[in-house]
Image (cartoon, helix red, strand yellow):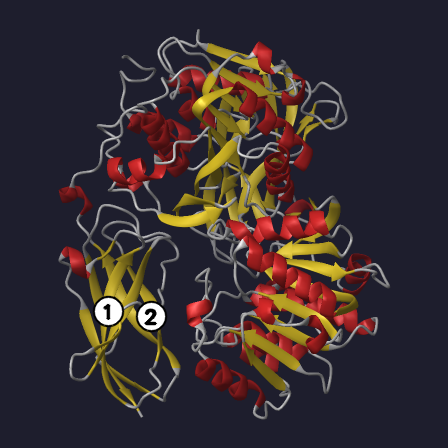
Amino acid sequence: MSANFLESYLGAFGRIEGWFSPDAALLFMAYNEVLAAHEVAGDVLEIGVHHGLSTVALAAMRREGAQVVAIDLFGELQAKNVSNSGSGSRAHFVRNMRAFFGDIAFLQCIAAPSNTLDPADLGQRFSFCHVDGGHTARETYDDLDLCSRILLPGGVLALDDYFNPAFPGVCEGAIKFWLAHDGALTPIAAGFNKVLFQKAPAPFDLNAAFTRRFPYIPHETATLWETPIHAFSSLVPFFDTRTSSPRALLPNGSFRMDAALTFQSGDVTAPGGGSIRIPVRVVNRSTIPFGARPGAAPFGLSYHLRSDDGREVQFNNARSYFAPPLAPDEERIVDLAVDVPNARGSYTVEADIVWEGITWLKDRGLDTPSLKLRVV
Amino acid sequence: MSMAMDTGVLRPHFERMQALPGWFLPDAAVMFMAYNQLVADRVAPGNTLEIGVYHGKSSIAVASLRGEGGLFTAIDVFDDLQSRDGASHDVGLKSVFLANMAASFPTLDWMRPIAAPSATVPAEALGPHSFCHIDGLHSAEGTYSDMRLCADVVVPGGLVALDDYFNQRFPGVSEGALLFERHHPGVLTPVAVGFNKVLFQRAPESDLNQRFACEFDYIPTHVATMWGQPVALFESPIVPCIDLDRSTPHRLVPRTESRLLMRATIEPGTAAVSATPGQALTIPVRIVNRTTVDFGWGIGLSYHLFASDGRLVRWDNPRSHFYPALSPGAAQEVDLGVVAPEAEGAYTLELDMVWEGIAWFKDKGNRTSTVTLTVQ
């Protein structure tokens, strides 16, 4: 594998057809790296490979000498594609795999509906399975059942489209699997159209190990199947994709998240209740744009409200999102929408920028300006 | 029958909703109104209910769906119970909500705000409702409880809308809903999915979506399967389909064809390209939006592939979208992604715009452009 393999691979997105994102690829690689560090390193398997966009990631992150098993209806069995969940091309798939790996002797292609495969034939030898095949409830249930049987204990299963409204069957099938096999798979993480599960019994706490290995990756906590999971909104900016490899991700040392905020008015007075708008000059001093792109975590201008004695009244308040995006080093006047408290008195409005689901910039060292709000 | 807000058309209400903070899309409001209009043929609009109102962004729409003499009930913990530490901070949420509602309607004598957790509100205290919107607690337990409450109060044939079923930050919503279905099978049946909402009907009409397709044949929908039922899937914005100056919440009026002219200027940056078999390439294309709507998600640039003898090779090809959305009259350069065919030879790419679920611009009389592709 070439030194700049990861950079080349991420550069191929948009040229290889498929609904897979660079963030999802890095999510797979990061968790796989944690698995490998705990010696959970078997073969990898994908159900629904299409043109191979995600298979390249799986193949690149597998341990030396491991096999890749690719299961798909390909073009020849599309009559059995009951959920119209993609129509892959074996020629495109093989060509794309060859383009990245040259010799693809490690690859085993199985052209068959996944629910016709016997777990015993595949063997319990896999450390990572990616389920992106049929999207009906039944197909999802069957694929989870299959993969939960062939994963090594502690191995990871990634499920596609759990939260995609175009395919409600995925969520249904997964929840039915949970109710029927409680404890077989433990939810671990969600992000970038994927949900990750770990095969039980797990020999170690995967998310604790993830946080130790990648302390610089921000995440929220959500609850899935009554289990706390890591919920991710962005990964690409936090890794140095030029120096990283699919099996060894390195932090992006040049990543910077900062801004300059300046209130464009002095202290304000307003009657209780209702909303007011206070203009704020925002300069983006980050290395990434403040955007509000659909499907990505948006940036918004917001504020924290404190009473006169410094007590926090409300930390989380209304947002004004950056649309269009504010590019690095650009500036703009943004109207900060402030809800005026009912109770009379003096308050402090502290402006801040939130990257939804990831962080407040104040927590990353942003110098936050404040003004007094007098409620009469 | 006179209806709430029937004295006014939608545009000012939509403009007011747009100005308020919250995660409610105007397209969701149109979806609510369309289905409410449909069921009104068989279920007289009565009381409406919303659980979780925040600043009232969606309440404006839900309140407008009530019938003559009907009440709008707003259940929210509002200020006193909002804080996690149990202290009373009174940041003004209730007063902001009331002020926003007062600014939207001439009187509020039909509104019944209930400051309490919804789980503590007995169904008997609410009475029958024709439309309910659940946007409160997003846990599995909270969702289950709210669905049970709404199933108890909604009349047969009435509608229940559920927020965030497909939101990865709140996996509990789908879990709670599916547990409700498991314990109360068939009580609420999904009928539509779109704009972060799932719409259910109590004791459903078997032909509701057929009637939708007839009554609203100008609104594009797809079909998905949820809980074993076919549901209408909304994947494109639908506000542009509606004449906001002539519609009311109880009677939607389509925009006239003349105002929905599908026109764009398509100017490829090159007249000819060459590629190897299967190669992915991009072609820069300048697009000028000559319609009256934004080119956002759901409207994209694509191409039709023809052999040198004019024979169609592939009509439907990948789309390239606009970011940021392209406003009417504005121009943007888009990289059109093209995958070369496997067979060598000369081809013609006919560049076309598509409005997903509605039409190709070419079919509506828009001029396309061509690029010659040589595969060798």
Residue wearing tag 1: B351
A66 lies above or below B3? below
The residue at the point 54 percent across, 80 percent down is: A8
Q: Earlier in the sequence, mark 1 or mark 2?
A: 2
SS for dot 2? strand
Viewer-nearest residue: B13 or B48: B48
Say whether residue A272 is visible: yes
Q: Residue furthest right?
A: A203
Binning the other alpha carbons within 10 Å of mark 2 as few (below 14), some (14 to 19) or many (20 upward) gives many
Question: At which x and y percent is residue B205?
Answer: 39, 31
Disc 1 vs disc 2: Cβ atoms closer than 8 Å?
Answer: yes
For badge 2, the amino acid type reads Leu
The residue at the point 32 percent across, 88 percent down is: B343
Residue wearing tag 2: B336
**Is A142 positioned to the left or the right of A74 in the image?**
right
The residue at the point 64 percent across, 80 percent down is: A68
For badge 1, the amino acid type reads Leu
**Is A143 positioned to the left or the right of B72 in the image?**
right
Do callouts 1 and 2 point to residues on the same chain?
yes
